[in-house]
Amino acid sequence: MTSAAEHMAYQKRDGPQTCGLSPVRYQAPSGCAAGRKIGLGARHLTDGGQLHYSAHPMGAAVGAPEGERTDVLLTALALSDSRSLTPVQIQKAMFLIAMEAKRLAPSRFYTFEKYNYGPFAADIYSDLTGFEGRNWLVIEQPANRRVRTYQLTAQGVEAAAASGAKLDPKLTAYLQAVVKWVVSLNFQDLVRAIYKKYPEYKENSVFR
């Protein structure tokens, strides 16, 4: 069984790799064409250490990203094997998209603040509530668990398929790697991994 330490993929050197995209520094994984390079992007926003890509991961010119932020959010839920994610998994997955794949994400994506458990975007919950209103998901909280989950319905799965079709395929591939990574970690290890990569977001944390 893979240890938690082996899942700490989001470090300065390495990240969850897909053929053509990995956080911060691209290293061609086995089975992918070698020689593709991607440099560090320019700093954005006002916090130090927030980096985005300065080049397209496949070496092509970057066009305007398609889709909306809700398409990315809905697709993330569908990419989970269980078609569901917990709040911390959703928040951290969307944060990594905002930070590591900004050039591929919709222009009006989520903005994150430093909160109790690191990066947090309140608009994510507003969008999830909208999904619930459309019968695309249900919010479940088992009696024996403190953590709720956002579970796609059959209608939500269909809507997610339409949303995924609007996204850049490279963004979808990266999102799939991110979702796989966040669900592989428990709450504590996931938050710690984000803090290790983005220590500035630990400033207001109640979790140490």
Image (tube, rainbow, N blue to C red):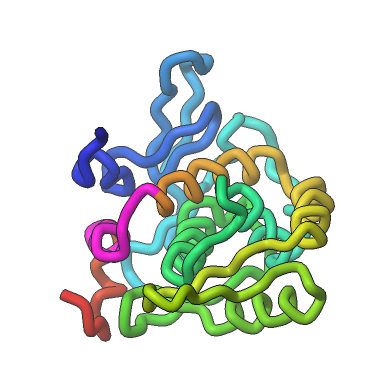
Rendered position, 177 above or below 137: above
Q: Identify the image quadrant of residue 66.
A: bottom right
Q: Is residue 141 left or right of residue 198?
A: right
Of the pair 65 and 125, the residue shown nearer to us: 125
Of the pair 84 and 21, the residue shown nearer to us: 84
Rendered position, 145 above or below 97: below
Q: Identify the image quadrant of residue 206.
A: bottom left
Q: Quadrant of the C terminus?
A: bottom left
Residue 59 image offset from top left, x and y in percent: 61, 30
Rendered position, 114 above or below 107: below
Q: Quadrant of the N terminus?
A: top left
Residue 13 image offset from top left, x and y in percent: 27, 40
Rendered position, 98 above or below 118: above
Q: Is residue 75 magenta?
A: no
Identify the residue at horizontal 32%, vertical 69% (top origin): 48
Q: Is residue 141 left or right of residue 185?
A: right
Identify the residue at horizontal 37%, vertical 48% (top origin): 184
Identify the residue at horizontal 39%, vertical 27% (top origin): 27
Q: Is residue 77 left or right of residue 205?
A: right
Identify the residue at horizontal 54%, vertical 84% (top origin): 122
Q: How many marks?
A: 0
Q: Please say whether residue 185 is visible from this viewpoint.
A: yes
Residue 62 image offset from top left, x and y in percent: 69, 44
Q: Is residue 170 left or right of residue 86?
A: right
- Which segment did they paint magenta? 184-196
Instruction: Single out the residue that lies furthest toward the left.
Output: 208
Of the pair 110 and 60, the residue shown nearer to us: 110
